[in-house]
Image (cartoon, helix red, strand yellow):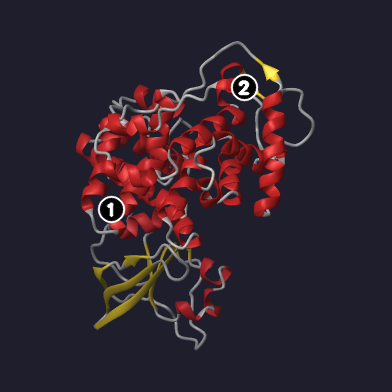
Amino acid sequence: MQESFLHFIWRWRRFDANNLCSTQGRPIEILHPGEWNHDAGPDFFNARLRIGDTMWAGNVELHVRASEWNAHRHSEDTAYDNVVLHVVLEEDQPIVRPNGERIPCLTLQGRIPPQILENYQRLDQDRAWIPCQNFMQNTPDIVRLNWLDRMLVERLEQKITHIQEILYSTGNHWEETFYRILARSFGLKVNVEPFETLARALPLNILTRHKHELKQMEALLFGQAGLLEGAFEEKHPRALAKEYHFLRHKYGLTPMEASQWKFLRLRPANFPTVRLAQFAALLHRSVHLFSQILEVETIRELEHLFEVHPDGYWVDHFQFDRPSSNRPKNLGRDFIHLIIINAVVPILFHWGKTKKQEVYAKRALQLLEELPAESNTILQEWSTLGFSVKNAYQSQALIHLKTQWCDQKRCLECAIGNVILK
């Protein structure tokens, strides 16, 4: 049995609380189990208990076996001096404070309903795609929908944490921050880190000075990406390399290592060279995208902001010096939707909350409700379990639930898991 299961039992009082007594025979009444502590220190803060004739307010620590108190060296940590009750499954040894005083102990052995224990063991041992896969159909729709709302907010909060870090590093420069978040989106999963590194190495204010010259913007982006090193056979990359050589010295730039970029197992349309050409074309059209995002109100207007069509050299190339058949390199509708989901929605939501303009936060959530759901293996599996994934709001929530909760087997903290364990 995991200690986390005892946390669940204590937190929700899923045990027989009749005639509770400490192992020394003193009656115990639980007035409030305390506030669950997710950080270091005792497991529950500010519990209110009556032990014998005395009312106590303090902390509660839980272990499967009482001896784990010493194994975890709690007696050496002053944070545990205010523990008023030690809750265990089994008291295999009495625990005393440094002054020799015995800490009151409550054992839950024999007080946990067999059905809850059986369901917990089944969840803990299940090796299905998600632990509760065989229980899912018995969960009320209202519980699932409310929990998905929580998952969506939590996913946004995670993304916002990263946005806050960038805002801090840029002195609260929202355009620069969006530029970096946008760059990450162009990297998808495989080249997220290289794109973010590039955006840090090439500040937006430098690109802004060359916003009217696409060739110079391409030179800066490809050059800083480390992709203009070496000799080229074709005219276009040679011209970009020459332009970058001048701009690099002008701004004192240091390029990335080209080896950071990943091409292996990517479709040619997703090669970083193609994405960089699209990124350059997008910024050439407007380097003040965030300001424009704040002004648009519909999905169609937003999609239009990102509709770019790199032409010229890139019509028949996916990489430098490697001609291909003529194929348009415009940003596809699905890719634009991913940009909106991963870049636009989080920063728009954060802007609304930070500036106390709820209209923007609501617009961000509305965008997710209007956008179609993503298509990937995670969402396909959810569909087979009976989840109707209607839009990006639900798909984002389900992706978060799977990756941050189910894969980590956090069933005891999950509202769905709580229903199953009842």
Residue shown at 45%/40% (left/top)? 403
Q: Position of residue 378 (x, y in %)?
A: 44, 29
In this rendering, does residue 418 appear at all? no
Residue furthest front as drawn: 212
The mark lying in front, picked from 1 and 2, is 2
Image-quadrant location for residue 308:
top left
> Toward the viewer: 232 or 263?
232
The secondary element bearing badge 2 is classed as: strand
Specify whether 29 is left or right of 160: left
Sequence-wise, which precedes: disc 1 or disc 2?
2
Q: Residue at x 32, y 53 (%)?
A: 351
Any mark on residue 352, and which?
1
Residue 244, placed above or below residue 413: above
Please name the residue shown 29% across and 79% down the image: 57
Give the CA distance from mark 1 to mark 2: 39 Å
Query: For this view, does 416 lie left or right of residue 196?
Result: left
